[in-house]
Image: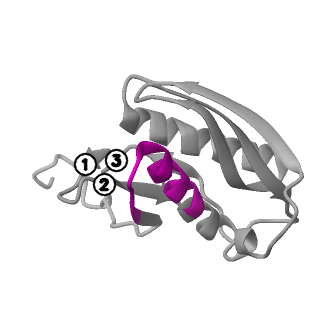
């Protein structure tokens, strides 16, 4: 037996199925929009920059204990809606936002499929903080 008490035929292997995204914004809403843009660039690169008419709309209303959890829950909800509706949400008009709540309208466009499959938006490494320039900043890890 090895030090972890595992049999010799069992071994943990490194896995590289994650994408790390470092994002920042001058305001908290801008950080959320930047992270949404980053997620979209993974799902369907270039899709949101093709001057498409956005005709898929979904309201979003999320509450959380802090801005980090709110961001991960926001991205997770958008990812779920993207998969359910087969759409990429290019914009979010934020109607109300605080460190604990986000209400808004997602605007997107239907797609035939995604270029990359994002399985989950993880809490690993996520920590919304102010950086040395006074901007909001975090790292998001996507499980792909």
Which residue is disc 3 drawn over? 126
Residue 109 is one of the magenta-drawn residues: no
Residue 52 screen position, x and y as percent:
84, 68
Task: State the separation of the CA atoms marked 1 and 3.
Answer: 13 Å
Residue 121 shown left or right of residue 49 in the figure: left
Q: Residues within 10 Å of mark 3 (few under 14, many from 20)?
A: some
Q: Which residues are magenta?
A: 21-37
CB within 8 Å, label 1 to label 3: no
Dividing the picture into quadrants, the one containing residue 140 is: bottom left
Which residue is disc 2 drawn over? 135
Marked residue nearer the N-terminal end (3 or 2): 3
Task: State the separation of the CA atoms marked 3 and 2.
Answer: 15 Å
Residue 81 screen position, x and y as percent:
74, 42
CB within 8 Å, label 2 to label 1: yes
Q: Residues within 10 Å of mark 1 (few under 14, many from 20)?
A: some
**In this orientation, which residue lies closer to the viewer: 36 or 1?**
36
Mark 3 or mark 2: which is in front? 2
**In this orientation, which residue lies closer to the viewer: 29 or 87?**
29
Which residue is disc 1 drawn over? 130
Q: Is residue 25 above or below residue 129?
A: below
Q: For the point 43% across and 25% down, which residue is it?
A: 100
Q: For the point 23% across and 50% down, which residue is it?
A: 6
Q: Residues within 10 Å of mark 2 (few under 14, many from 20)?
A: some
Q: For the point 22% across and 60% down, which residue is it?
A: 133
Secondary structure state at the residue bearing disc 1: strand
Residue 20 shown left or right of residue 114 in the figure: left
């Amino acid at each position: 037996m090895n030090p972890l008490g595992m049999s010799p035929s069992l071994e943990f292997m490194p896995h590289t199925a994650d994408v790390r995204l470092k994002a920042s914004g001058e305001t908290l809403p801008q950080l959320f929009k930047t992270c949404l843009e980053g997620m979209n660039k993974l799902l369907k690169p270039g899709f949101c920059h093709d001057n498409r008419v956005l005709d898929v709309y979904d309201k979003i209303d999320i509450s959380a204990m802090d801005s980090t959890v709110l961001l991960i829950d926001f991205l997770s909800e958008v990812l779920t809606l993207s998969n359910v509706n087969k759409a990429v949400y290019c914009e979010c008009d934020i109607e109300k936002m605080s460190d604990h709540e986000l209400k808004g309208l997602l605007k997107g466009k239907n797609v035939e499929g995604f270029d990359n499959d994002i399985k989950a938006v993880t809490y690993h490494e996520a920590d919304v903080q102010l950086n040395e320039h006074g901007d909001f900043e975090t790292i998001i890890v996507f499980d792909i």
